Amino acid sequence: MRRVTLFVNGSPRNGKVVAVYGTLSDLLSVASNKLGIKATSVYNGKGGLIDDIALIRDDDVLFVCEGEPFIDPQTDARPHEELTGSHTDWLTLNVGGRYFTTTRSTLVNKEPDSMLAHMFKDKDAWGNKQDHRGAFLIDRSPEYFEPILNYLRHGQLIVNDGINLLGVLEEARFFGIDSLIEHLEIAIKVTCLLLYMNVHVLFFQTIYNLVLSVLALKQLSQQNSQPAEDHSPISRKEFVRFLLATPTKSELRCQGLNFSGADLSRLDLRYINFKMANLSRCNLAHANLCCANLERADLSGSVLDCANLQGVKMLCSNAEGASLKGCNFEDPSGLKANLEGANLKGVDMEGSQMTGINLRVATLKNAKLKNCNLRGATLAGTDLENCDLSGCDLQEANLRGSNVKGAIFEEMLTPLHMSQSVR
């Protein structure tokens, strides 16, 4: 029976003496078990590849590898862990005095552009310092590092009770974990909102699920280049979640989104940018649309009865057949609603307050403006054909160049001066 001493490729230490029997495959199996590696080939001390067990002599010193080329232990005596290119070897980190054991692939694969990936991707590239136990020293807070390490392991953000999310966010920024930063920022906003509303959150997972919903809606809002018909309409429930996660006075960007047929009644929609959005057949009754941007939006067939439209921008919007009864366009601060060039064919705006409104070159053919307050309104070039203006207050309104063919001016509150209209 022959005996040989086995070493890991490139290492002159921690050898194992084994008996040689059977075939070369049997020897590789014994080497894998003894050395804790997946042995695939064997070299002699001079780097010669052994492919037949008959070539092995008693007391030979052999070097076992996992497929990599032979490394002469006399010219490169660094530990095996530093010589292999594998990203699956185990590492121990000393973070602020607390030890964490993980694999190199965990630190590198999830966020390849992060600081941790650069520190441990190429061995010794950063000159990482080690303590007396061989653990890599990192001068950061261990309690904030633990959620980040777990996120790199399984992709889920899990934070124990009593851990401040702001501390975890600061660590994520320091290490450059980009995919985690956005999740944490929105989670912090949602948490602050829930605390303000005095809502007790039993599980942090509830907040995280809400964060995922907000991110999905945000990604949808950024797809401005896609036509509205490419995705299904946004529901009231989804939009309310979006509103709750955003400060009241911040401008929400909802350009080009599809809200067709949605019930958005009685919601606070101030300052929201609905430019080119599809709001056809929506229920916006009693909604607060103060200073909202509805430029080129489709509001055809929608219901906006008693809505607050102070300072609204509806340039070139399409509101054909919509109902705007009892709406308030009048802003006491002097901010005027702008509906220039809007398509308002057949709209019902009976009893609306529209002092100083800009309806220049708008189309109001067959519209109902009965009992409306249009004092100081700009109606220059407006198409008012067959429009019902009975009971309206048109004092100081500018009707120059407007088309009033077939329009009804019965029961006017103030007389209409001839100079106000030229055709």
Image (tube, rainbow, N blue to C red):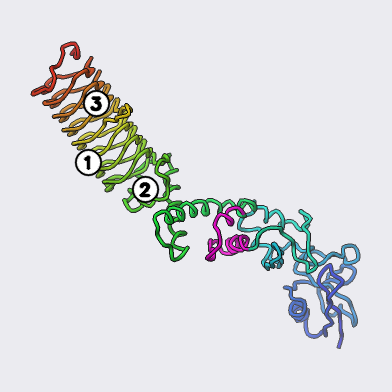
Q: Which residue is mark 3?
A: 355
- The boundaries of the magenta stretch are 143-170
Residue occupying the point 74% across, 61% down: 137
Residue 200 lies, in percent from the top left, at 41, 62
Up the image or down, 1 lies above or below 177; here it is: below
Callout 3–callout 2 Cβ contact below 8 Å:
no
Q: Which residue is mark 2?
A: 231
Badge 3 crowding class, 10 Å Cα cut-off, few under 14, some 14 to 19, many 20 or more, is many
Q: Which residue is mark 1?
A: 303
Sequence-earlier tag: 3 or 2: 2
Secondary structure beneath label 3: loop
Up the image or down, 71 lies above or below 342; here it is: below
Badge 1 crowding class, 10 Å Cα cut-off, few under 14, some 14 to 19, many 20 or more, is many
Up the image or down, 339 lies above or below 289; here it is: above
Callout 1–callout 2 Cβ contact below 8 Å:
no
Viewer-proximal residue among 374 and 343: 374
Select label 1 or label 3 by which is in front: 3
Callout 1–callout 3 Cβ contact below 8 Å:
no
